[in-house]
């Protein structure tokens, strides 16, 4: 087992290098750089940036170097925890990551918990009530949850909450409470802000888990040992919960490992959108 883990870790190194190269190439594909975009935005708003200042900034951030030098400079900082400097946010990228990592993990863990708490009972019900009205309705909503992208649900939520209810959807808490001590009021405020984003993150995973649990349980319920258990006079609840569900749930454990990175990525994107909007509102 230890040798397998070591081989997987060693094999991860070239994979990360390839991903970093592809990421760097994709970032460099659009013409110009961030400073060019900044100059264009300044010109569009009626201002301008001195060319000498642009050259000085390019030299300061290494944007005047060849692309391979920029890549080596960028990737060489990874082992030291140096991911570069964010020109837009005017802070090291590592600080941005660590400042939001706790809330990102909170979003992800809560969404994963909601996914399992909701999907498993619904999947069991759908399998044990196959083709009933409840199964048909839950199947419809399950397909709906799989087809509607989470970012679309997030945009609809932000629009409805802002314009219909006048609720604040900016940030993880109400502006002004960021530096306040953790009290019951602050905790409830954070909970009110993360409730709907967590539900949105959990929708896709819940719909997927419902379909998988239903299919697994239907297959298990058709096995011979389930028929034998029923023939022995065991109640249907005992047959389903003690024998069938315990076997049907096993493949879903591996799926949990695939869902967590997806939820973390979704929570990170959602956090970036909220931080961007907060900064935009502050400028206004």
Image (cartoon, rainbow, N blue to C red):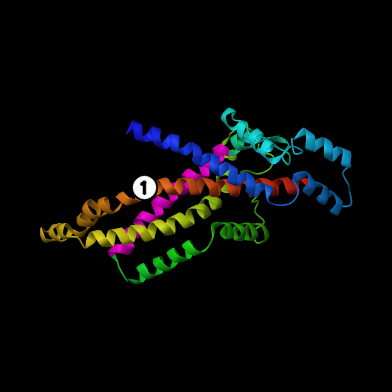
User: Magenta segment: does it hold 117?
Assistant: yes
User: 163 or 251: nearer the eye?
Assistant: 251
Q: Where is residue 174 in the image (x, y as percent from the top left)?
A: 65, 44
Q: Where is residue 242 in the image (x, y as percent from the top left)?
A: 22, 51
Q: Residue furthest left?
A: 232
The answer to whether residue 105 is seen in the rendering is yes
Classify the position of the N terminus by image quarter.
top left
Q: Position of residue 135 (x, y in %)?
A: 35, 67
Q: Which residue is drawn at 26% across and 50% down?
A: 246
> What segment carries the magenta color?
101-128
Q: Residue at x 55, y 53 (%)?
A: 196
* Residue 234 as seen in the image, left or right of residue 92: left
User: 195 or 240: nearer the eye?
Assistant: 240
What secondary structure is marked by label 1? helix
Q: Is 1 above or below relative to 230?
A: above
Q: Residue furthest top?
A: 80
Neighbourhood count class around disc 1 (C-alpha, 10 Å): few under 14, some 14–19, many 20 upward: few
* Residue 114 as seen in the image, left or right of residue 233: right
Q: Position of residue 16 (x, y in %)?
A: 52, 40
Q: Which residue is drawn at 30% across and 63% down?
A: 127
> What residue did someone put label 1 on?
254
Q: Is the magenta stretch mostly helix, strand or loop?
A: helix
User: Magenta segment: does it hold 54?
Assistant: no
The answer to whether residue 179 is seen in the rendering is no
Image-quadrant location for residue 72: top right
Q: Is 129 above or below relative to 175?
A: below
Label count reads 1
């Amino acid at each position: 087992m230890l040798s397998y883990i070591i081989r997987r870790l060693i094999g991860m190194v070239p994979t990360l290098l390839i991903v970093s190269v592809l990421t760097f190439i994709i970032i460099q594909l659009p013409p110009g750089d961030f400073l060019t975009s900044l100059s264009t935005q300044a010109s569009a708003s009626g201002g301008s940036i001195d060319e000498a200042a642009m050259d000085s900034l390019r030299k300061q951030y290494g944007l005047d170097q060849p692309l391979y030098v920029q890549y080596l400079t960028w990737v060489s900082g990874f082992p030291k925890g140096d991911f570069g400097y964010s020109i837009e946010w005017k802070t090291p990228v590592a600080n941005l990551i660590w400042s939001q990592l706790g809330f990102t993990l909170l979003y992800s863990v809560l969404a994963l918990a909601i996914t399992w708490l909701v999907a498993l009972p619904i999947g069991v019900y759908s399998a044990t009530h196959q083709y009933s009205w409840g199964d048909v309705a839950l199947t419809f909503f399950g397909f709906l949850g799989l087809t509607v992208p989470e970012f679309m649900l997030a945009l609809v939520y932000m629009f409805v909450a802002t314009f219909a209810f006048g609720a604040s959807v900016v940030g993880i808490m109400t502006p002004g409470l960021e530096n306040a001590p953790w009290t019951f009021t602050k905790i409830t405020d954070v909970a009110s802000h993360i409730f709907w984003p967590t539900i949105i993150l959990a929708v896709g995973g819940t719909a997927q888990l419902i379909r998988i649990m239903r299919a697994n349980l239907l297959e298990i319920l058709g096995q011979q040992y389930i028929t034998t258990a029923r023939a022995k006079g065991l109640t249907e609840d005992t047959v389903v919960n003690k024998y069938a569900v315990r076997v049907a749930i096993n493949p879903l454990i591996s799926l949990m490992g695939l869902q967590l990175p997806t939820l973390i990525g979704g929570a990170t994107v959602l956090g970036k959108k909220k931080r961007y909007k907060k900064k935009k509102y502050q400028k206004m």
